[in-house]
Image (tube, helix red, strand yellow):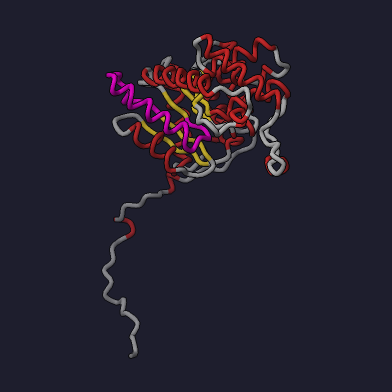
Amino acid sequence: MKIEPLDFSGLKTYSLHDRYSKVTVEHFGTPIKENSSLRTFLASLPDQLLGHDFPELVRCLAKVHRSGRPILVGMGAHVIKVGLNPVLIDLMERSIITGLAMNGACIIHDAEIAMAGSTSEEVGDVLGDGAFGAARETGEVLNGAISLGAREGIGMGQAVGEYLLTRGFPHNDKSLLATAARLGIPVTVHVAIGTDIIHIHPSASGADIGTTSHHDFRLFCREVAALQGGAYLNIGSAVLLPEVFLKALTLVRNLGYRVDDFTTANFDFIKQYRSLTNVVHRPTAQGGRGYNVTGHHELMIPLLAASLLDELSESC
C-alpha cells in the first residue's frame, strides 16, 4: 500500500516575538578580558544552568559564613587523593569549614600522607598476590589510634587526629585530621566494616571501630542539629555520606530541632542518585536551596574556595 507524505500546509503558527523563551541575549556570557579578576570571570558566565547556580552558591556560602553559621563538609577519599588537602586546610584555618565528615577510606589516605607524604597504591599490581592493603604502618597506626580512642571515650576522627599529632609525623601539616585536632574542629568518621584496608589487619577491633564510629555519628547529629541557616557540602561521596546525612537530619528533626532552612551542595564527577536525592533535593524541600555541581574535584573545589574567598574579601 502506498503511503503519502503528510501535508503540513494547515499548521497553525504564532509570532516568535509573542512566545516565551527560556534563553535570551541577556542570559549570554561575555568574553573575558585580559587581567580580569575571578569576580569578573564569574560575572561573565552565561546566566544558565551552572553558570547561574555556581555564583549563587558562592554568594550563599559567603552569607552563611558572615552570619556565623556552620559550613559542614562531608567527603570521600578521592578528594584527598587528587591533592585537595591544602585547599581544605586553608578554609579550616580561616574558620570557614567548621566540621568534616569522612568515610573510612579518608582516614587511611590522610594518615598515610601524614606519615609518608604519599598514598594510594596501585591495586592492580598487588591484588594478585594478596598484598593489597597490607601496609604495616597504616594498620598499626590507625587501628592503634582507634582502640586508644575507644578506651578514652572519644570518636574516631578525634582519636586519629590527636594520635597523628602525638606521633609528630613529618607531613602533619598536610593532614586534615591532624589539622582539625590542632584547631579543635570536629571530624567525624563513618565506617562500613570491611570496606577499608585496615579492617583486614589483625590489630583491627570490631568493637572499637563500632564504638568510635557510632560516637562520631552522634557527634555528627549534634552538628546537623545546629545547621539551621548553615550549609552542608557533600564532596565525592556517592553513597555512604549522603545516607548518613539523611539519617542524621531525620533524627534531629524527630527530636524537635528546627533544621528546615539551609544550603546544600553536591560535588561529584557524575550525577548520582543518592547524593542528588539525599543531599540536594529531599533535605531542602521545606526550605533553603540545594545545588549540584558536576565536574572534577581538582578543578571545582579550588574554584569554589577561590571564589568564596574573593566574595568574602569584597564584603569586608
Query: Which residue is located at x 47 percent, y 44 percent?
Result: 271
Q: In screen coordinates, is 190 left or right of 229?
A: right
Q: Where in the figure is residue 276, as x and y percent of width and height?
A: 42, 39
**Taking the image as drawn, is residue 83 in sight?**
yes
Residue at the extreme bottom of the image, as rendered: 1
Instruction: Examine the image and state in which quarter residue 257 appears.
Output: top left
For residue 238: magenta? Answer: yes
Instruction: Examine the image and state in which quarter residue 223 appears.
Output: top left
Q: Where in the figure is residue 54, as x and y percent of width and height?
A: 48, 35
Q: Nearer the viewer, residue 230 or 194?
A: 194
Query: Which residue is located at x 28 percent, y 23 percent?
Result: 254
Q: Where in the figure is residue 14, as x and y percent of width and height?
A: 28, 63
Q: Which residues are magenta?
A: 234-263
For residue 192: magenta? Answer: no
Q: Nearer the viewer, residue 132 or 281?
A: 132
Residue 93 vs 199, above or below: the answer is above
Q: In screen coordinates, is 58 left or right of 262?
A: right
Query: Which residue is located at x 38 percent, y 25 percent?
Result: 248
Q: Quadrant of the N terminus?
A: bottom left
